[in-house]
Image (cartoon, grey):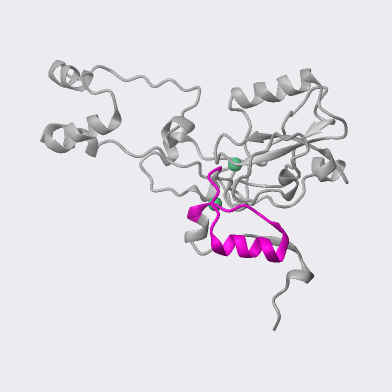
Amino acid sequence: MSLLNLALQNVALERPDMIEDYERKMKRNGSMTKVRNIGEKELHYNKLFDNLHWLPDPVQVQKDSNEYKSFDDVYGVETDDSGRPSLVSKNVPTSADLGHKGGFVAARARSFIICRVCGNRRVVYSGKRLTIDQMRLIERVQEEFIFTCGAPLFPDGVMKETVYVREGQSCNSEMETTYYSDVNGLNTPVCFFCGDTEVITNQEIQNLKQEYGIVRPICDTCFQGGKRPAVRNALKTNKKKR
Ligand SMILES: [Zn+2]
Ligand SMILES: [Zn+2]
């Protein structure tokens, strides 16, 4: 799904008709790339594009504020995504997180939910095994693209207290280690750093597996970018002799 689609979920765009010649030519093009190609080739369209601005990022009225500037205030202004709600670093426990004290453990990891912004999987916790009805409700949240990192799974209702996610995280947060507990056999390995489902293995990773009980999965992009698998539980017996 493109970023444009993500930004415009549930939004309809309307525009007035252009002159007939433009409409006729544009109608033949089913994608933005084709529309842009015409824009590049034909001067008139280039002028049209000159008057268009990128969709602005959300901009906070004040730093760390929950209030955002109106579209008209930021349209045409250069913005960055530092104020994007799901990116604003929130790796401190919220009051809801504190209410689930001891609740973010592997034994309570029951499922996961995918953030609609970053695509990362966030662990769904519950004290008891999920019922079929509960699983269906989680699926509905997933299908309707409601969930983002840092938000509650169920903002209200009967399941708010019993089935929950860790809210003190953002789209920048690494995977929760409880994700890998795989209690329900639901979880496929995903990159510890970015959540990518295409994880790799190579000789260096194999060697780490000889040395550590736990070697977290990693994707090619993170590995090529210089990251190395997160490891735990050094196996003393296999330690190289010095
Ligand atoms: Zn996210
Ligand atoms: Zn990765």
Q: Is residue 187 shown left or right of residue 43?
A: right
Task: Give coordinates of residue 175: x percent, y percent.
Answer: 66, 49
Task: Give coordinates of residue 191: x percent, y percent.
Answer: 59, 49
Number of callouts in the render?
Answer: 0
Q: Which residues are magenta?
A: 197-221
Membership of 86 in magenta stretch: no
Does the rendering let one see residue 149?
A: yes
Membership of 199 in magenta stretch: yes
At x 67% / y 60%, what residue is drawn?
Answer: 209
Q: Is residue 131 shown left or right of residue 46?
A: right
Does the rendering let one see residue 228?
A: no
- In the rendered image, the quadrant that contains the C terminus is bottom right
Q: Quadrant of residue 149?
A: top right
Q: Quadrant of residue 18?
A: top left
**100 and 178: which is toward the camera:** 178
At x 29% / y 36%, what residue is drawn?
Answer: 52
Query: In the image, is residue 242 above or below residue 85?
Result: below
Query: In the image, is residue 116 above or below residue 89?
Result: above
**124 and 230: which is toward the camera:** 230
Q: Is residue 60 shown left or right of residue 235?
A: left
Residue reaching furthest to the bottom: 242
